[in-house]
Amino acid sequence: MNIIEKIQIEIKQDYYQQNYPNDGQRFVAWYMRNIHLLDALQTKAAITDGANDKQIDAVYIDDDEQKVYIVQGKYYLGDSVDAEPVREVISSWTQLKDLAALQEGANSKLKIKLNEISKAINEDDYNVCFELITTSVFTEDAQKDIVAFQATLSNEDASSYDAELVVVDRNGLEDKYTQTMEKDNPSLNHTINLENGKYLFTTIGTTSVCIVAMPLKECILFPGISNGTLFQKNVRQSLGISNAVNKKIRKTITGDKCGDFFFFHNGITAICNKMELIDGNKLKVHGVSVVNGCQSLNTILSCSEVVKKRDDAYVLFRFYEIPQKDRADNISINTNTQSAVKTRDLRSNDKRVIRLKKAYEQKYPNGYFAAKRGETLPADKDKEYYIELSFLGKYLIAWYSQRPSLSYGETKIFDKFFDTLFKKEYRPEDIYALNYWYNKIMAIWTEENPYSINETILTMKAYAPYHFLFTISSVVAKLNGKDMVPSPYQCLMAAKNNNMVDTMIGIVVNCMNNAYSTGEENAKIRDKAFIPQNWIKSKDSIAAIQAAVNNYISFLPSMNAQMNKALKEAFVIDPSFFEYRLAAD
């Protein structure tokens, strides 16, 4: 079954038939679910297609990547599609230059999304990725328009924000889907076509080495570039197209100096478990990972339509056959120190993080503290005690700084707030408890929605769970009459010992739903538009949660005296386990 047949079958499922009125919307929804991996509610929230959609079919803001995805889909089953969809994307890009005017004539869903886009671009400096997706292939004229538009976007003065165009046609859909399926299996194999006279095999010590002058159009065929699996052993993932070096790389590719790319670029380094020459002119690499060149390959891929037409553009590639993990890690670190690496990319090696990792794994021998991005749970470790550094930072700012509104911004946490958050020694038990509470929250974040979380809150999966975490701390502090931060572990032990873990989750859902309703109602009273994503990212959400917690605890005696007594007795915590919050404003 090819990818088009798969899409045709799957969009006939009840979810797509019941929620989207035509196959065009169903195709875009399928893409958001299967390529961007959004859940059912997030997908519905992302779709903006319909009357007055301003050539924007879907909007998705990825806070981890710090990227705004603006999707335009064309569900055509013919052999080719002309340049009209390309011009529609150009139109949406042009209109985005004046968000106020665009918002005025947009449909209600797009109005809200445009507000989110404005905040992401202007306040958080996110990049914008226009994705043009189709089930067909583009005509030659359409491809010319794509190349021209990509060249326009590479011009730094083209707009006030950094933007790129990614085109996904019938063949690209197959590749994207395959890459997504491989996301949980980062061991990648790939076969490279070698050009006569442009490669060299040698041995340095006991290590097999292959040096290749590789055409740029061969580079974009590597699996795992767009989803990051090709860079699992790298110290960092893509920094986005706004990075100064990446801008220069893109400008070279799209400009008249593309033929000199080989001489301008320092080269790309990849390691693999095994490599072999097959059929005389093909290099097959097993378990390949690029340890230096993540930025370059992502930038080259963003210029794919230009690159496909260049036969004179090359880049230096070095392949090392190195199956030993510790040696591979050393190579990854050392090959990246020659270029500027932001502090957050190397936090995994910070002595404070290393101390936390050692203390945690010593306390929980069956646990694993993943300090490096891309690390997976070893087979002999317990999933319940597995924690990632990136999530820990988000937990800490939500619980100890009492600022869940900042938890979505990984960059801020590991740059601006890192020294504040990681200056204290956290007990391994508290780290475990934070992770336990978060996983407990995520366990109810399902389509079945067993605790009846407000449906709009459910769509904000990237933000709202940290507010739930914050709410737990607020409830326990209120029950103890404290304006301080309780120990996560003491909260957990109190809940477990009194069989009240689920009870606490129920209280938190109640408070969150009430806080959200209050925020929505206050906006109506002030005659202002209520943007859920803006609310959840603001201090207004924190104040509303605290008010909801106060109301819940205050009114509980009159509503349920028995529950009130049980709660207060269960969650009595010694004052020594409270502390002042860490400032992070």
Image (cartoon, grey):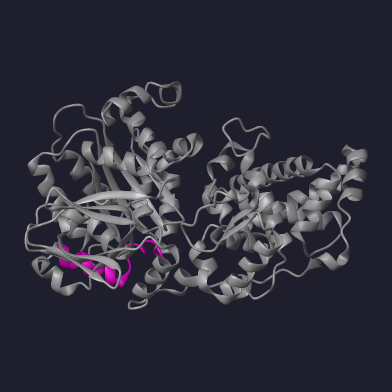
Q: Which image quadrant is residue 367 in? A: bottom right
Confirm whether the magenta stretch covers residue 239. Answer: yes
Q: Position of residue 22 (x, y in %)?
A: 34, 24
Q: Position of residue 34 (x, y in %)?
A: 39, 37
The quarter of the rendered structure image containing the N terminus is top left
Residue occupying image coordinates x 30% and y 49%: 189
Residue 380 lies, with reference to residue 445, above or below; the image says below
Can residue 521 be seen here? The reply is no
Confirm whether the magenta stretch covers residue 472. Answer: no
Does residue 16 appear left or right of residue 75 in this picture?
A: right
Foreground residue, 358 or 509?
358
The quarter of the rendered structure image containing the C terminus is bottom right
Foreground residue, 240 or 90?
240
Does residue 464 appear left or right of residue 62 in this picture?
A: right
Does residue 35 appear left or right of residue 575 in this picture?
A: left
Residues drawn in magenta: 234-253
Residue 181 lies, with reference to residue 412, above or below; the image says above
Q: Position of residue 107 (x, y in %)?
A: 39, 39
Foreground residue, 476 or 311?
311
Residue occupying image coordinates x 20% and y 26%: 77
Q: Position of residue 74 (x, y in %)?
A: 25, 34
- The number of callouts visible is 0
Can residue 549 be seen here? The reply is yes
Residue occupying image coordinates x 36% and y 59%: 231
